Image: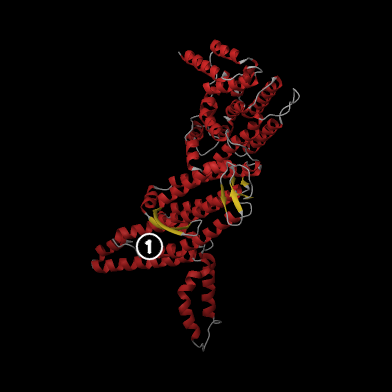
Amino acid sequence: MDAELKKLRRNDLGDDEQVSSLSENFWETAQAIIEDLVDEYITENGNTSNLVMQKSNISAAEKVTLFRFDASACALTTQSGQTIKQLHSLICPSSPWNITALYPQLELFCNERETETNAKPCRLRSYLHSFIVNVFIDQFKGKLEAVAEQALKEQDAWRVLMHYPNPKVLGSCWNVYSVCNQIGKLILAMDKYTERLSALWLLVIDEFSDSANNVYEKILSSWKPTSEGKDSVASSVSHDDGYKEKRKISAAWAVDEDISRLLKSLPNWFMVSNYEDNSTASVNTPSAISPTSESESDICCRNERESEIFIGNLGTAKQLVRDELITDMEIIRSLACIHESLKWFCGSMRSLIEKLPESSRNAMHKCVVQLQRTDGSGIVHQSEEHIAVALDSRLADLEAKADTCLLIIHLELRVHCFFHLLPLARVRPSLPHDELDNEVIDFGRDMAHFHQVLSTNLPPHKMKYLFDGLGHLSASIFIHSSQHMQKLNENGKKRVCRNIFAVQQRLSQLTGHRESELERARIFFELLNHDPDQLLALILERGAIFSHLEYTYLLALALRSHPILSAQPGALEQRILQLKTILTQLKK
């Protein structure tokens, strides 16, 4: 159009100011027409137009009508034409959401006009900005809050798994991510409004995080009378109503900063975390570092330090009470599902943010928002954060919650080992030679239930993290508990070896490994078939296969079980000195 005006100026020798004025009037008129056209498509049920025309309609209604020409031929022809025009003018139903399809082309038009006239903003851009900020985003925010609230407050939102291709995730996580994905699409369509739209992510994720925390607390909280007098290693918080909230051992340890930091510094945790970092979004895609290539000796080395930590903390406990264990497999299933779903949600959100154009990501890093949150005590905290930093912090908190759920399951399996196997050191009546202790039977049943529930909700590398090391820990419990055995006769030795073999058989079925550490524990008790002096001679002859502390336990139990040496003062001290000399000699 501008080129045509310039041509007209050359041909007709028109005045420059007149041509410029004509051009400005033309584009102003064009933009006004575009506004009217866009308004027809983005006005829902004529709401916007009604608000603009409300005042004039009221004034017109107050006037007294003397004559009407509605039935005249001219009026009927005009109305018929307008009706046909209205019927054929719109190619789709009007809706504020149509702005997402119209915006890219309108944005290009506005850029061209502003470049040509050096005037910012142009009339059409002002109109678009006013609509997007005052109407569209407000409506979208209201709809967003309603959808997010419905997604989180449905009865089975945190129980039912959506059959997403891979992995299966909880309905709450899937629905909330769908909302966030819709925000991401809007940012891609209208990147100039990244600051306002990305701030909506914070609102949704904050509500989602609060819901996840409430579900987590509800799953793990149990209430017991404060009059309970049993020794406990689980943490508890007393309340004024005569009750105390008692956490399970695994839950109490998982949220303890020192304990969780220690456990997460071990090779076990590094292995599962490294797998997560090197894997792609698809769980079926093999990692660059495959945990299945490990040998049993590698697994043993990886779990040795962890077994020492558990023996040092739970091996000296007076008694583990069943109430301190998680025995409901539905809770274990819920923790596994929450872990996987939160991990999937955080990974999907980070991927969604990474796909945004660089201009949008830069805008999120620069934009500062005021945030207001209420803590558990009802105190309101206000803070200012950059949107990108705030989003990363929220996702990191959700990932930490997911890690806590996995750590609880990992701890719970090991607490069950102590609960079932540590009492085997107590004195008990002799059993027939082919019968197992009830604790061993219960242990095998519990491990099978855990494996059945977890294998349907967790990928193989996390199953490996949970179950690898149970054999090493069980062997350590058997050897460690020997110090609490008063003495072992022939039947007692056979009973212990029988129990060890049964535990090894069960764990081998679940892990697919020989669990050779339990063979080591069986050899430990088979050495009791020799008297203490023969034991020392065997160590010197064959070399040391146990630690100094383990040999000390072995010699002490052999002496307690010996009919003569058990009554001799100083017999143990003398042989421990001999043991120390032999081990020193073997090291040379």
Q: Nearer the viewer, residue 573 or 460?
A: 573
Rendered location of residue 68, percent (x, y): 53, 85
Residue 524 located left or right of residue 401: right
Q: Which of 399 and 311 is in front in this view?
A: 311
Amino acid type of the residue that numbered disc 1 sits on in the rendered structure: Arg
Name the residue: 62% across, 46% down. Answer: 161
Name the residue: 74% across, 26% down. Answer: 431
Local crowd at mark 1 within 10 Å, few (<14), some, or many (≥20)?
A: many
Q: Can residue 228 be seen in this view?
A: yes
Rendered location of residue 583, percent (x, y): 50, 16
Q: Quadrant of the N terminus?
A: bottom left
Rendered location of residue 201, percent (x, y): 47, 53
Q: Can residue 105 be seen in this view?
A: no
* Residue for badge 1: 125
Residue most toward the front?
A: 569
Q: Which of 172 and 36 is in front in this view?
A: 172
Rendered location of residue 72, percent (x, y): 54, 82
Q: Is residue 248 above or below residue 82?
A: above
Name the residue: 55% across, 27% down. Answer: 292
Q: Is residue 52 above or below residue 210?
A: below
Residue 343 located left or right of residue 224: left
